[in-house]
Image (cartoon, rainbow, N blue to C red):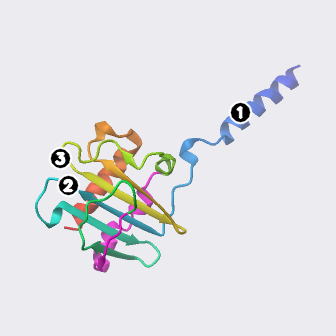
Amino acid sequence: MPALRSLFSFLVATTLLTACSQDDDPAPKPDTVVFGHFYGYCLGEQCIEIFRLDARAHTLAEDTTDTYPSTSSAYEGKYAPRSADAYAQVSDLPALIPAQLLSETQRVIGQPDAGDWGGYYLEINEQGTRRFWLIDTQKRNIPAYLHPLLDALQERIQRLH
């Protein structure tokens, strides 16, 4: 009986140590990341700032159309190249996108720009598949796992100004 108990303890311990958790989900490795912020009741060029980071080509470009993002389709912009230095300032962004975001069933997370506080646009293109989200800037309206991403988006967009 002690041998059976030891075997059972070993199997339980092994199962617990090798079980997958949500943290073990692989992070996305997007080819491109389109990101930025938008404000509906705002004047000036900085009301809508959208950038396209190409991880394969190691380039960054800025959208020149400054169109308010849609909830029904991915952002279609016209992009002008930015400097290699600008790319270096945001090149870590793809690694900061949480894997849990890929499980989101809604394209709109929270209430972006509902109270004139703006929103973030985030799109990943991974092996030809485009996925995008409009995310509230107010942390109280979004899941906690997105808080570090919002901080990163805010900081990276500020770096580019």
Identify the residue shown where x is 82% and y is 23%: 5
Q: Residue at x 31, y 76 (%)?
A: 79
Magenta residues? 75-98
Front-most of 30 and 6?
A: 30
- Residue at image mark 2: 39
Quadrant in the picture for the N terminus: top right
CB atoms of marks 3 and 2 within 8 Å:
yes
Image depth: mark 1 or mark 3 in front: 3
Q: Label 2 is placed on what type of residue?
A: Tyr
Q: Are marks 1 and 3 in contact (CB under 8 Å)?
A: no
Which numbered tag is attached to residue 13?
Answer: 1
Report the label total. Answer: 3
| Residue 94 sits inside the magenta stretch | yes
Secondary structure type for disc 2: loop
Name the outermost residue toward the left.
Answer: 43
- Work out which residue is located at the far top of the displayed protein and give it: 1
The residue under label 3 is 116
Please tell me whether mark 1 sits on a helix, a strand or a loop.
Answer: helix
Secondary element at tag 3: loop
Residue 134, placed above or below residue 52: above
Tell me which label, 2 or 1, sits earlier in the chain.
Answer: 1
User: Could you say which quadrant of the image residue 88 lies in?
Assistant: bottom left
- Image marks 2 and 1: residues in contact by CB distance under 8 Å: no
